[in-house]
Image (cartoon, rainbow, N blue to C red):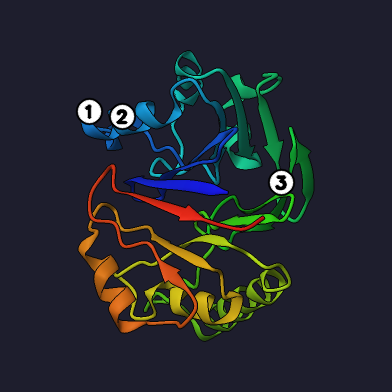
Amino acid sequence: MKIEITYIFHNCFTLRLPDKTFLFDYPADQYLDQTRREAVVSRIRNTHLQLFSSHNHQDHFNRNSMELSSYTQSLTCIFSGDIVRKNPQLKGNPLCYTVDANQSYTINDYTVDTFRSNDEGVAFLIHLGSLHIYFGGDLANWQWEDLTKQEYQLLVSYYGDVLEKLKQWPIQIAFSNTDQRLANWSGAAQFMATVKPALFVPMHTFGKTTSIAKFLDENPHPGIEGFHYRETGDSLVWKVEV
């Protein structure tokens, strides 16, 4: 199977399969200049769009997401529970699935397992037959300097537990935060070493994509390919046997 992954901004990516397109963490309008909007529209046009939003923060969710349906053959939205609670206009919308943490859902022809984020919302593990795609949202190893000892221990323990669960699956594609503001890159190298996805997609750069090359150069993992993107619209065409 041939898969095309395109970087839009921050945690927003498209992933195109032969029969459907995924759009992850489409951000609020304030983060979308003309280039980013056009990059999204060009990738989703006339496709069966699966729109995943991990939580309600503006850099991960756009309140006008439903407008994307005007470009697609069909639209399915998978929104974390905190999004729907804070945006009541979405309740009861037949195009929207509301997902909560630590649950499993069947949506169209795939299943989704969710994991509680240690920030807000959820992370997603998507199963399409033998293809497994992880999208972490803001689930990461957030080792901020102002953490108390107890907060640090809980953070490290929880993140480690999630990675141990994830490594049970042969995950081919993993999107996980690689935040240059933290000395540990928000747990990205730990993720790669434990989960061992075939393809690792760094994210959470706020558009400062020069950090991607630095991270990948400093953290080589044999057998794991990294997506080194530089600007909106950069794509990787990746083949996987499923």
Kind of residue sitting beneath label 3: Asp
User: Distance from label 1 to label 3 (Cα)?
Assistant: 33 Å
Residue, x 57% and y 82% (percent of image)? 150
In percent of width and height, residue 22 lies at: 53, 39
Sequence order check, earlier mark of 2 and 3: 2
The location of residue 107, given as percent across then percent down, is 74, 36
The quadrant where residue 147 appears: bottom left
Helix, strand or loop for disc 2: helix
- Name the residue tied to disc 2: 37
- Residue under label 3: 100
Tell us which disc is closer to us: 1 or 3: 1
Q: Is residue 107 left or right of residue 59?
A: right
Q: Is residue 207 above or below residue 94?
A: below
The crowding category of the residue bearing disc 2, from other C-alpha atoms within 10 Å (few below 14, some 14 to 19, many at least 20), is some
Tag 1's secondary structure? helix
Residue that protrudes farthest toward the top in the picture: 70
